[in-house]
Amino acid sequence: MVTKDDHRDARSGAPLRTAAIAQQLQDDVGDLDVVSRWKVPTIRTHDDRQIVPPPPVAVMVAYLRVLFTSLPYFCPEVRHRISFDMVRKIVALNRDRDYAVTIIEFSTLLVYRKILRGAVILDMHNVESALMANYERTLSRPRSITEMRHRIWVRWNVWGLTRLESRIGRFTNHMALVSETDEVLISKLMGKRGNVQCVVAPNGVTDRAFEYETPRSETVVFVGYLGWAPNSDASTWLVNEVWPEVVRRRPSAKLQLVGREPGERVFALANESVSVHPDVPDVMPYVGGATVATAPLLAAGGTRLKILEALGAGTPVVSTSMGALGLEHLEGAQLRIADDPLAFADEIVEILTAGVTRERESAVRVLAEPYRWRNALRPLTELVEALSGTVDVPANEAR
């Protein structure tokens, strides 16, 4: 597995999915090596053998192959994923043993395909080009040089990621996506450029969420990687546009913003009824102890892991349409969708007023049951087994 995250510290969306895939592959398939970004050592799960450093010349040749592969798509999101140390680890592992299958997490790492052996599966957490385009649409008109530079940076990424993802067929014939919505998006993007077999392996939720029990308070929670611009924007929208109406009608209500690396902008949102909880070791006490979980995203992609985590814990969710992307079919009494600030506040207040009874907890958890990780990832693990020759090839229609 080639990824940009350390799945051993799984507290936000991307590492949670990576960790779940790694665990499921170990359970279902066996041997697995994980190469992550340069800050994280290579993780070996099949033995404790030391990896012999490869010759510097071999590493340099491999690095140049990756670099030149990236040039047609040389946008910032791809550029800063190119790591000499990551190349060194891949070359070392290729010299050490033969790999039947490699899973590449995220389309931004596709450029490493040129130095990988065997079959490759691209696991797309999001359609990154669509995610960046959604974010661009939320930006206001630039009013300073800094804002203009940021818009140029975003536009550059949209261009590069669109080119890269429209040419996925050049890198692999196998791909896993997290929702049918993403499958439609990527099919339109690729057009006739590649005959790529797609399987849908949605995001999921751990068994632990279903077992978590804690007293609930009159609390609303938003959990996410707060250092990510769309989540920072979502926090601002929730606090400034939605929360005043909630507090007017429920003065005792409290809002908690929970997640990694919040910037000054997020910390500035704190007040008497709003608290910021950075880098907590475990989000479950916040999610399981809340009466309402929210997903107020204005730009998003894939399926929302934090929505599924909240549902698994028995906590009703209020989300924007963008926040619930890929989970629209779950909309109902336990997953409310509203895009207008006043309507969003109405849904929060209604749930706070009704509270969360044992019966409601059970009804919420039923929605998340099909998304237990072992169920959600089965199409992906079956594809890995098929490509590694351990089972018959699944009869998925190639797209």
Image (spheres, helix red, strand yellow):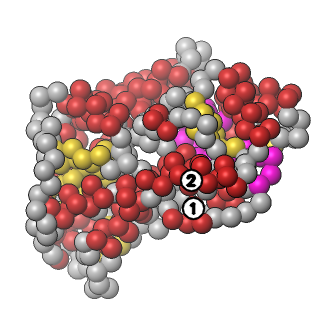
Question: What span is in magenta?
Answer: 216-235
* Nearest to the observer: residue 330 or residue 31: 330
Residue 210 badge: 1
Percent of width and height locating residue 391: 13, 66
Image coordinates for residue 98, horizontal then vertical, percent? 13, 72
Residue 292 image-quadrant placement: top right
Pick out the residue farthest to the front: 359
Around disc 1, counting alpha carbons within 10 Å, would you say few (fewer than 14), some (14 to 19), or many (20 or more)? Answer: many
Q: Is residue 4 visible?
A: no
Return the disc, 1 or 2, that comes first in the chain's sequence. Answer: 1
Where residue 317 sits, quadrant-wise, is top right
Q: Which mark is residue 380?
A: none
Query: Total label count?
Result: 2
Callout 1 amino acid: Phe
As rendered, which of 61 and 52 lies closer to the eye?
52
Q: If the image is split into quadrants, where does the C terminus sit? A: top left
Q: Look at mark 2 in the image and give the residue it sits on.
A: 365
* SS state under label 1: helix
Where is residue 9 drawn, in percent x and y?
51, 64
| Quadrant of the snapshot with the N terminus | bottom left
Q: Is residue 312 above or below residue 29?
A: above
Whether pointer 1 and pointer 2 mark residues with C-beta atoms closer than 8 Å, the reply is yes
- Above or below, 130 against 172 in this view is above
In the displayed structure, 377 sits above or below 89; it is above
Expressed as whole percent of the image width and height from the top left, the position of residue 132 reads: 42, 31
Which residue is drawn at the image coordinates 48% and 28% (left, top)?
A: 135
The residue at the point 56 percent across, 17 percent down is 140
Name the amino acid, label 2. Arg
Question: Would you say residue 129 sits in the magenta stretch?
Answer: no
Question: Is 224 in the magenta?
Answer: yes
